[in-house]
Image (cartoon, helix red, strand yellow):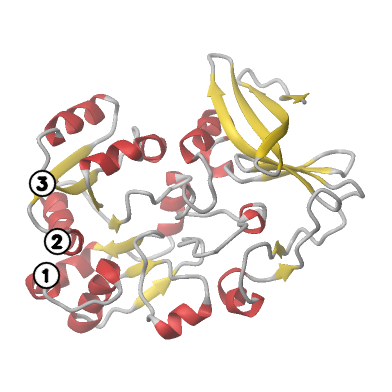
Amino acid sequence: MSTTVQGLRDFRGHIRHWMTHSGASLVVMVERDPSAFQLQTEWRAAGIDITIIESKADQQERTASLLTATYSFAKSRRLPTEWIIISDDNTFFPSIPRLLSRLAVYDHRVPFYIGAVSEPTKDLFEIGVFAYGGGGMVFSMPLLEELQPHVGECIELESDGGPDMRIARCVYRYTRTRLTIDWEMHQCDLLGDMDGMYESGFKPLTLHHWHDWAKLPADKVGLISPITGSENLFQRWRSADGRWVLTNGFSIVEFPGGIRPDMSKMEFTWAGEMKQFEQSLGAFREKLQKDTEKVSYRFVHAVHETSAVHQYYAHYDGDKIDRVIELIWLKDGRPYRIHGMN
């Protein structure tokens, strides 16, 4: 990834979730900063295999330069490397095991360029078809090898769509490889209420805009992973009485009249025309009325203790929290407990 030392500090919590003792290596290009080496030392001590490379180049050039930096790093380690992923500093990987399982579907021995596009169809027509860094860009080693003689020219390519488009232009101009869209990688270009997507039972490989648009504390979401497994983040559970649905790490929803909606379809809760999102996220159902058809408690915090993980889900009255549900997951295999608090 390309960011700043401050960017790494800001997003350390969620990066720690998916990188710590993952077996993956993190290569980061940053602008020159006297504290970069100290940060690298601290993160390595915490179990994150990070290498920070300082550069005088701007953000666009640093991102394109990752095509060479990551390839050279992989070759210098002399370890079998199948995939290189270039992402933003705020790209959240809910489950590395799930990501690796998905990548195993593709043949790493041939050139591959895999990623997420913007969800609205109009963006594909207006901006173009390329992988967004927020959702993650995946390259096989043969493709990066093919690009190496051209990276210098790629850095100079014009791009009105940021560094992600510049990388796409590099791939399209100098190779015969084209983007393979993976619909479980999510750029999350959804304006407004994203509840419908998160509560759909989807199994995302990547997520973007979780911190600014969805307001999701991803660093706390991941605390439940040692108990449920990271593969079960955003997994849904239905209560025995048919009135409640837990989406692990996102919400607890009460349906006062019972769970009547077709839960196999995604509730269309965000702004825009439904038809613009049918290709990327459909099928849909209509939005339910807040606090009458659907009473939502959003995930706000979690605490990891020796014997349990405590999750807290809050109901909002306007901008204020008026009710909280505490969900306690016990590590010894006993059933979890739920406490309601006004």
Amino acid beneath label 3: Glu
Residue under circle 3?
54
User: Which is more toward the observer, 47 or 134?
Assistant: 134
Foreground label between 2 and 3: 3
Q: CA distance from mark 1 to mark 2?
A: 7 Å
Depth order, front residue of 214/37: 214
- Residue at 29%, 26% (x, y): give it: 46
Tell me whether circle 1 and circle 2 mark residues in contact (CB < 8 Å).
yes
- What residue did someone put label 2 on? 65
* Residue at numbered disc 1: 151
Q: Earlier in the sequence, mark 1 or mark 2?
A: 2
Neighbourhood count class around disc 1 (C-alpha, 10 Å): few under 14, some 14–19, many 20 upward? many
Hey, which residue is sitting farthest top in the picture? 306
Which amino acid type is shown beneath numbered disc 2? Ser
The mark lying in front, picked from 1 and 3, is: 3
> Which element type, helix, strand or loop, lies under badge 1?
helix
**Quarter that holds the C terminus:** top right
